[in-house]
Every structure is written in structure tokens, then in C-alpha cells.
Amino acid sequence: MSESFQSLELQVLRWAEARKIIPNSNALTQAIKATEEMAELLKALSTNNKEEAIDAIGDVAVCLVICADFMGVSVLECLDQAYSEIKDRTGYLRPDGIFVKD
């Protein structure tokens, strides 16, 4: 796996254009599709099916790449913004799964 994320992102967008997802879809539709793919991820994780989980993570990523493109941004820009917000956040995750901010 030597390709950069940006290269894969471009390939996904070209794929979406070739199948008329772009321009015939929209950000909301892609977000809904990402939610459907997340449900598949949850199912795969709950059954310990690693292969299906990997596929579902990829499908979610594809939907998010297309969704971001409809919004005029890239997934990397979104990730950068999110990281900028959390990078200095301190706290800890409790055993019950709740993150407690300092």
C-alpha cells in the first residue's frame, strides 16, 4: 500500500464521476449512505468479522470522500480541522467508554 491518501481520494472521485454519483448525488445523500455503511461496520464488529469490518470502513471512507467533495473540501481538510480541535484536549476514557475532559 504505497499510494498516498490524496491519490486514493482522487481515484474515488474519478470513480464517482464515471458512475454519475457526481453530479447526480449530493452531500446529504452521501452522508446517509455513510450511515448505512456504518451500520454494516457495527454488524461486522459485533460478529468479529474482520474482513467485513475492513470492507465497511473502506465503504464509509468512500462516502465521506464524496460527501466532502460535494461540500467543496477534502476529507484531509476535514481531518486536519478535527485534529486541530482535539490535539490539545486532555482527559481520559473511563472503563464504561465515556471520555472525561479535564
Image (cartoon, grey):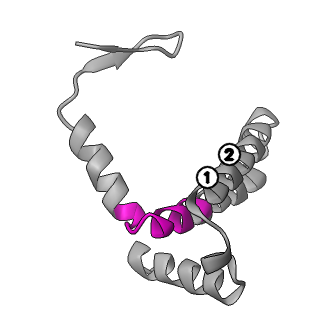
Task: Tell me: residue 19, above or below residue 62.
Answer: below
Which residue, given by chain and number where applicable, does mark 2 sit on?
35
Location of residue 23 (image quadrant): bottom right
Q: Residue at x 74, y 48 (%)?
A: 36
Q: Crowding at label 2, few (<14), some or many (≥20) Cα neighbours within 10 Å?
A: some
Q: Residue at x 65, y 52 (%)?
A: 34
Q: Secondary structure at mark 1?
A: helix
* Screen quadrant of the C terminus: top left
Q: Say left or right for 78 vs 61.
A: left
Q: Say left or right for 8 vs 6.
A: right
Residue 85 image point, x, y percent? 24, 38
Q: Amino acid at mark 2?
A: Thr
Q: Is residue 70 magenta?
A: yes
- Magenta-colored span: 63-76
Q: Is residue 62 visible?
A: yes
Which residue, given by chain and number where applicable, does mark 1 sit on?
31
Observer-nearest of 81 and 1: 81
Q: Residue at x 60, y 54 (%)?
A: 28
Residue 78 image point, x, y percent? 36, 55
